[in-house]
Image (cartoon, coloured by chain):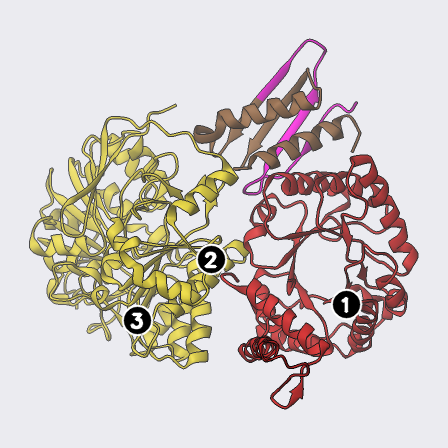
Amino acid sequence: MRRSMLFFPGNSANMLLNADFLGSDSMILDLEDAVAPTEKDSARILVRNAIRDLGYTREVIVRINPVDSPYWEKDLQTIIPVKPDMIMPTKVSCADDVKIISDYIAGLEEQLGMEVGTVKLIPLIETALGVENAYQIASSDPRVEAIFLGGEDLTADLRCKRTKEGNEIFYARSRMVMAARAAGVDVYDTPWTDVEDYEGLIKDAEFAKSLGFTGKSSISPRHVTFINEVFSPTEEEIQYARDVFATIEKAKAEGKGVVSLRGKMIDAPIVARAAQVLEAAEAMKGGR
Amino acid sequence: MKEKAWAGTMESSDIYVEVEPLATGSGIDLTVNSVVYAQFGDAIEKTIMETLESLAIDDMKVVANDRGAVDCTIKARVETAVRRLKEEA
Amino acid sequence: MNGKLVKDLKEAIRLSGLEDGMTISFHHHLRNGDMVAVMVMEAICEMGIRNLNVNISSIFDTHEPFIGYIEDGVITGIETNYMGGVVGRAISEGLLDKPVIFRTHGGRPSDIISGKSPIDVAFIAAPTSDCMGNCTGKIGKSACGSLGYAFADAMYAGKSVVITDNLAEYPLVDYSIAENYIDYVVVVDKIGEPSGIVSGTTKITKDPVGLVIADYAARAIDASGLLVDGFSFQTGAGGASLAAAKYLKDIMLRKGVQGSYGLGGITSYMVDMMQSGCFKALYDVQCFDLDAIASLRTNPNHMEVTAAHYASPTAKSSAVDSLDVVILGATEIDTNFNVNVHTDSNGYIMGGSGGHSDTAAGAKMSMIVAPLSRARLPIVVDQVMCKSTPGHTVDVLVTQRGIAVNPLRGDLRDRFLDAGLPVFDIHELRDMAEKLNGKPKMLTRGDREVAKVIYRDGTLLDTIYNVPVR
């Protein structure tokens, strides 16, 4: 279960040392914007060693440099051998961008004797063209497990101002959710960038959830608590999900075919949703 | 090969490593300064020597200023410095 | 009106009757900006008086010249509650023949009042005084706020000398220490460096690890069952402790909890909590920043308390006795929950109890906040190098990785688990840190006693030995 994702600068030894303890469901170890061009080499080696030796228990995503940069191949050559859960390609604008990376990873996986397709992808969509091509990107490759909206770069591309209200990315958010769900993958929201404004963060996260986002990313560990709360099922939702399964069990025992709960027929989507809720509730136990 | 290269930072939990080539047969000339020298000095030296060996380095001057880095960080910074020296970065 | 004014410091020292072998005292409210202790020592040295025992509530790095006075035999004994790293290092290397006596902020006034540690002459730096010695720290160019640690000295010393750089008209309004305890008043140009006395504002940490620790700490307090109307609280001025106070404030406001009092060294964050309605009152033994001083001066609910009222174990009652929760720091904590705040990882003195063990003993829940490791050194060790606060008074350790609860407090453990907090055995936290960092080599200590740590009840808690010079 992935509700929150937290970014960590790839060249910070101290942050990588603590990345596993800061509460996010996934951690994004960043080789791109958080690393100066002169430190790309040291960051990728540091991130590789951290993944290899620190025994991370949470999902590891490595954000690599864009395909039009001189770094992305070196990034993958260095990182794929330590088997991150996912790679986050950046500035993805079309299905071909995904294909290039997927094929390159496949080559590395073969060389390394790994099963081809082991490492998954979560493309970062942060251009107008990328948003327009979101469905093609989401359905471009079996490695793609989710897509991710980058609001800051997108608004630069749209030549508009990024605001707290977020009207300027409303279309992009809706489009991303639609594309992801149509392609059967998850979808993650852009970080909230005002570190101190928790109320704004909660409102923004609740809005993203209401649109259908799976979860939200963050640049501040303090935000993670709130994001996890927003994207976790509520007590009521958990009780309802339990009731769904209890009702099904009871119906089975009584030999009934069609069952209903609180006046509504329990159909496949309701069962699927209830299963998701209980899975999420189980994963939430005993942590942040 | 460059005349000198370095990697790392002086931030807490990091290590700053400087390397210079030495003539063949000179061996490794290693200096370690560390805020935790009393507790980890030997361990740091051992990790640096092993990393150099794994990179097939026999002759090199290495100066390390350690701020409490763990092994995987020490290894990363040494490797980066050596690669930069050999212009493999 | 000249009152008790004398022409200069040397005249006051002469009149006080100070002789070789006596005990003098200072307070530390001017913190690292204090100029008075060194100024007095200089005058004493010039007058040829030697072999003095110095009882000073805390020693900061600004007191570095003490090292010279020790070498010259002017100072031959030190009693204190806290010692910064500069003098601490010299002491640890064996500078002083007689072991330093470390007390607590509560133990010091207790021993002064009972006569166990008598003071011959107290030198009291006062940011404002009138000519009869009514004095305060609330106003003046060197304002420091509360003078809490100086009261016992003024009241129980053989002679008490006030040293000020701001002479006010008699009678001083809203004085802290009253004239009936003061023998002489000396006016000097400057008693302290304002930038070293208080920080402009105290800042909470921006370090993500510190914020996670603070988040767990606040949630643990919420889960403890103690966060109800009437709640009382103390926190240190460290970054993570302040962040915890800020998160605690959010919880208290959200739940509408009306606390009773905030205690201890006071920062702008505690002032903000009182002003927001989290506490009815503040008991202030020491101001840490300008907001705290301003609040102490203007808000009648923000009250100056003496060190004895704050924490004395022999007082009829002290404020720590009614404390619900205290958040404290540590350089090391062992698997029996004993805490070291006296020495650093190499065994050098760089701290002291202050109010650590007083509040830990008094509070219903004492909580240590610390990262799992600092620069590769694990916070949890098998045995602390110095026992500053005994483990049976320490209830909870909060790290970024999780929370360890003293086995004596199974009740708290159950509450934390119910609240979904990550609770571990303290040995597990030790093992996690070792797995990440490796096991540090044990240090060998010297065999010369350089300091004795006296617990608040007067018993010897631990002995600190010299660090062999490498």
Which one is in front in this view, the residue at disc 2 or the one at disc 3? Answer: 2
Q: Identify the residue at horizontal 8%, vertical 53% (top origin).
A: C158
* C-beta proximity under 8 Å, tags 1 and 3: no
Q: Within the image, what quadrant is residue C286 found in?
A: bottom left
- The residue beneath circle 3 is C232
In the rendered view, does A69 fall on the left or right side of C404? Answer: right
* C-beta proximity under 8 Å, tags 2 and 3: no
Chain of residue at mark 3: C
Q: Are marks 1 and 3 on the same chain?
A: no
In what quadrant of the picture does the C terminus of chain B appear? Answer: top right
What type is the residue that disc 2 sits on? Ile
- The residue beneath circle 1 is A151
Residue C292 percent coordinates (x, y)? 37, 68
Numbered tag placed on residue A138 in the rendering: none
Q: Identify the residue at horizontal 81%, vertical 70% (top origin).
A: A176
Whether residue C275 can be seen here: yes
Q: Identify the residue at horizontal 39%, vertical 64% (top origin).
A: C416
**Which residue is at the front of the view, A141 or B35?**
A141
Residue A17 percent coordinates (x, y)? 57, 45
- Please identify which colour was used for chain C in the image: yellow
Chain of residue at mark 1: A
- Please identify which colour was used for chain A in the image: red
Numbered tag placed on residue C213 in the rendering: 2
Q: Identify the residue at horizontal 85%, vertical 58% (top origin).
A: A92
Chain coloured brown: B
In the rendered view, does C93 fall on the left or right side of A131? Answer: left
What type is the residue that disc 3 sits on? Ser
